[in-house]
Amino acid sequence: MKLLSKEMFASEIRQYVHHDNYDAIEIAQYAFLCYSDYIITDEKLKEVVYEIMMMDADSCMEMDRIELVNYIENMLCIKI
């Protein structure tokens, strides 16, 4: 298993949020893939990945594009 870094995660998320057809469910599925296929040692990153992953399970947790970017930037101190 590979290690997931904040930079790797942010780079992929950036592609999703800047795409014209923003799809929160697709982003949640990417987060699930990260959660299951990568080792996540950074606790903040693990929390962010888990919260995004839960958007697929619970529609009331779904975030729009701006909410998602703000959440990730605030939690990980990284620019999307």
Image (spheres, helix red, strand yellow):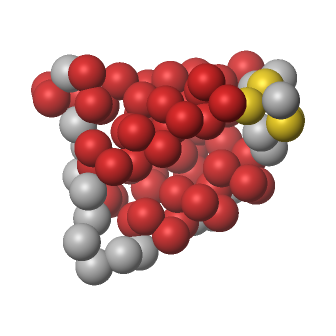
**In the displayed image of the protein, which residue is found farthest to the left?**
60
Residue 27: x %, y % from top left: 39, 48
The mark tally for this picture is 0
**In the displayed image of the protein, which residue is found farthest to the bottom?**
20
Q: Looking at the picture, does residue 67 appear above or below residue 51?
A: below
Q: Is residue 27 visible?
A: yes
Q: Looking at the picture, does residue 16 appear above or below residue 74?
A: below
Residue 37: x %, y % from top left: 67, 30
Q: Is residue 67 visible?
A: no
Q: Looking at the picture, does residue 20 appear above or below residue 16?
A: below
Quadrant, the C terminus = bottom right
Residue 5 is left or right of residue 53, and the answer is: right
Residue 57: x %, y % from top left: 25, 21
- Which quadrant of the figure has residue 36? top right
Q: Residue at x 14, y 26 (%)?
A: 60
Quadrant, the N terminus = top right
Residue 55 is left or right of residue 13, and the answer is: left
Q: Residue at x 20, y 21 (%)?
A: 58
- Which quadrant of the figure has residue 51? top left
Q: Residue at x 28, y 79 (%)?
A: 20
Residue 46: x %, y % from top left: 65, 24
Residue 10 is left or right of residue 20, and the answer is: right
Q: Residue at x 66, y 42 (%)?
A: 76
Closer-to-camera residue (24/36): 36
